[in-house]
Image (spheres, grey):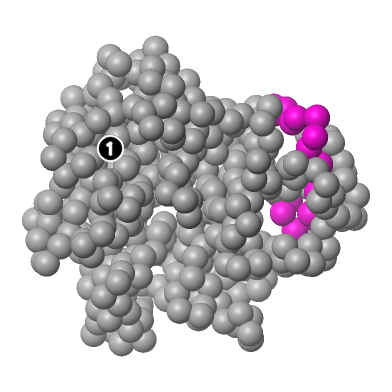
Amino acid sequence: MAVNLKLAGLAVIGLGAALAGAYQVGRTSAVASAAALQAPAAPATAAAATPMPAGHPAPAAEPQREGKVGVDNAQKFTHFRVGNKNVKRIFVDGDMVWVGTSGGAVRYDTRTDDYKLFDVKSGLLSNGVFHVGKLGHQVAVGTYGGGLSLLDPKTEKWDTFNIPEGLGDAFVYDLLKAKNGDVWIATWSGVNRIRGGDLKDRSKWELHTVESTKGGLPNDWVYGLAEGKNGEVWLATEGGLAHYTAGRWENWNHSKGLGAPYERVKADIQYKTDPSKVSEHHAKQKQEMGLQNVDVAYNPNYIVALAVDAQGVVWAGTWGGGLSRYDGKSWKAYTVADGLPGNHVFMLHIDPKGVMWIGTNNGLARMEGETFKVMTTQDGLFNNAVFSMATARDGTLWIGSFGGVAKIKPS
């Protein structure tokens, strides 16, 4: 029997965890085993300075909350373990790298190799982290089940915003501060807009849902936010792509060109477990799309990742329907047949040089014109399921996967 639980959505987000399996590393890898980055189910030793081969089992230990990681900077890439978890977000803030996992957020100082774990013991209301970014001088952490928390980096005190403060839902997936000062918060019960960004003023909070927008927002489960070159806001939802500007809503779904057709991708769908079999929410969506007879993980309306490039082109990563591109007039879909390593697109990252990176269930792709250059564990990835990425000022790539983070030097 299907269950109507919001937590069932977590099974969709974390599906790669169950399927990722073993991984390989290149000969030049160096593994830095930071205890604060360990899951209780598969922790490394508390002696964080001792490198260990990737995948080597270690005795259980209480995670060390802060310390120093031993890193060999002469190596081309370095691996940091997080245990049996997905690294959902990586954020680079100057010399600091923030790693968001289902076990809290880890702050890593690239100058000193010091790390510190922030979790429920540090003031968060939930260890599950979907988003890490910056809002003014504060570090913004969006959690699943614990709302939005803002950290003052000087005092290391948290200020939390939840449903009583106006938040649509305690599950916060993304945050955007627009050029006009408005703050948008993506939740699993609609999207909040805080006019002028004044989170302390309850009167400035708005909540936009399918009902309040009369269907302009196609689905209340909002996963991503991006701002266009003209200040418009784009929203990734589980029911398609939405666009907001000057008080008007517009949306696109599979029937309007989003995602590749099932016939085009069915031979390359690697995830066979269909979330609609355990969630009434997902089952209803597939039925509405006429996909109730597709019993694999395919839903092109489900946008997992979102980005807008400097030209204003919108890029959407879909659940099994590949990568979609919208230039304001028409859609184009890229799939495994076009060179993508996988049709489940979990992450989109545009680096400072304007290069598009695509994290999939089967590797990381760098877009070069209309082609893709693929990276896998053989090239330094910790695991081929790639969920997050950031680029440091020196060009270093930080890539989050199932089980850990890869730090790869620019070539």
- Inspect this view and state whether residue 103 appears: yes
- Residue 83, compared with residue 56, is above or below; it is below
Instruction: Assign a secondary structure to mark 1.
Output: strand
Label 1 belongs to which residue?
Answer: 325
- Which image quadrant: the C terminus? top right
Decide whether residue 351 is among the magenta residues: no
Q: Amino acid at mark 1?
A: Arg
Residue at image coords 58%, 67%: 93
In the picture, measured across the screen, residue 376 lies left or right of residue 75, that is: left
Please tell me which residue lies in front, 305 or 339. 339
Q: Residue at x 19, y 38 (%)?
A: 253
Q: Quadrant of the N terminus?
A: top left
Give the vertical position of 45 relative to 179 (above or below): above
Read off the magenta span. Answer: 22-40
The one of 405 and 238 positioned closer to us in this rendering: 405
Q: Residue placed at 28% from the left, 37% from the top?
A: 325
Residue 354 is left or right of residue 329, and the answer is right
Residue 65 visible? The answer is no
Q: Residue at x 21, y 62 (%)?
A: 230
Binning the other alpha carbons within 10 Å of mark 1 as few (below 14), some (14 to 19) or many (20 upward) gives many
Q: Main secondary structure of the magenta part?
A: loop
Q: Position of residue 393 (x, y in %)?
A: 59, 60
Q: Tell me which corner region of the image, top left, top right, bottom left or bottom right, holds residue 58.
A: top right
Residue 205: x and y in percent read: 26, 77
Identify whether 5 is placed above or below 270: below
Q: Front-most of 404 and 57?
A: 404
Left or right: 15 with respect to 335?
Answer: right
Residue 32 lies, in percent from the top left, at 80, 48
Image location of residue 198, percent across then percent down:
33, 84
Residue 25 drawn in magenta: yes
